[in-house]
Image (spheres, helix red, strand yellow):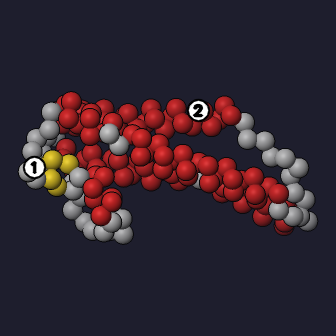
């Protein structure tokens, strides 16, 4: 049976989760370029699901905040183009994760086993935070309307 490591040394709030450990675990041996790419691509669907759920929540909260009194916005439009561009951009930067890891593998081979999991967790967190931005904008707009009323 292949020994696996988790790539992260500290046990932070997310590090205690068994699911997170399984998602970011990597083989203990030196991986080939193809194995690094496969490691990332096997995690693309869960990444897209999590970011998509964050984006859906962000848009739903945006619409909800815009319907709150005082002076609710009649029908806040959610244009499809920004949603599509966000999804394409998120996947572009996701791909950049394994590109950076492959470049780093040549420059700093001893650090690469820890780099992939760190890039994945950091990039995923930033993507979800960005996906929730419409909710923050909707909240700020509601506070602004309430203060002006």
Q: How many marks?
A: 2
Q: Which residue is mark 1?
A: 2
Looking at the image, residue 130 sits to the left or right of residue 145; the answer is left
Residue 145 in which image quadrant: bottom right
On the question of residue 127 being in view, the answer is no
Q: Which residue is mark 2?
A: 85
Q: In x, y percent, where is residue 85?
A: 58, 32
Looking at the image, residue 46 sits to the left or right of residue 3; the answer is right
Helix, strand or loop at mark 2: helix
Name the residue at 27% across, 56% down.
22
142, above or below 112, in the image: below
Helix, strand or loop at mark 1: loop
Residue 45 in which image quadrant: top left
Q: In x, y percent, where is residue 127?
A: 49, 47
Outermost residue on the front side: it is 1
Q: Mark 1 near mark 2, Cβ–Cβ under 8 Å?
A: no
41, above or below 138, in the image: above
Query: Of residues 42 and 124, which is closer to you in this image?
Result: 42
Query: Of residues 134 and 40, which is closer to you in this image?
Result: 40
10 Å crowding of disc 2: few (<14), some (14-19), many (20+): few
10 Å crowding of disc 1: few (<14), some (14-19), many (20+): few
On the question of residue 23 being in view, the answer is yes
Name the residue at 33% across, 47% down.
119
Q: In x, y percent, where is residue 21?
A: 28, 59
């Amino acid at each position: 049976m292949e020994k696996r490591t988790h790539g992260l040394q500290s046990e932070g709030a997310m590090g205690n989760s068994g699911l997170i450990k399984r998602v970011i675990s990597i083989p203990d041996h030196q991986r080939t370029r193809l194995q690094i790419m496969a490691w990332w691509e096997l995690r693309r669907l869960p990444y897209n699901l999590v970011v998509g759920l964050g984006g859906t929540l962000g848009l739903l909260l945006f619409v909800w905040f815009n319907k709150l009194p005082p002076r609710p916005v009649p029908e806040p439009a959610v244009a499809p183009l920004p949603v599509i561009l966000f999804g394409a951009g998120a996947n572009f930067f996701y791909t950049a994760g394994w590109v950076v890891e492959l470049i780093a593998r040549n420059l700093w081979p001893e650090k690469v086993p820890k780099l992939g999991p760190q890039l994945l967790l950091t990039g995923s967190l930033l993507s979800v935070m960005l996906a929730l931005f419409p909710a923050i904008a909707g909240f700020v707009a509601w506070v602004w309307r309430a203060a002006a009323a």
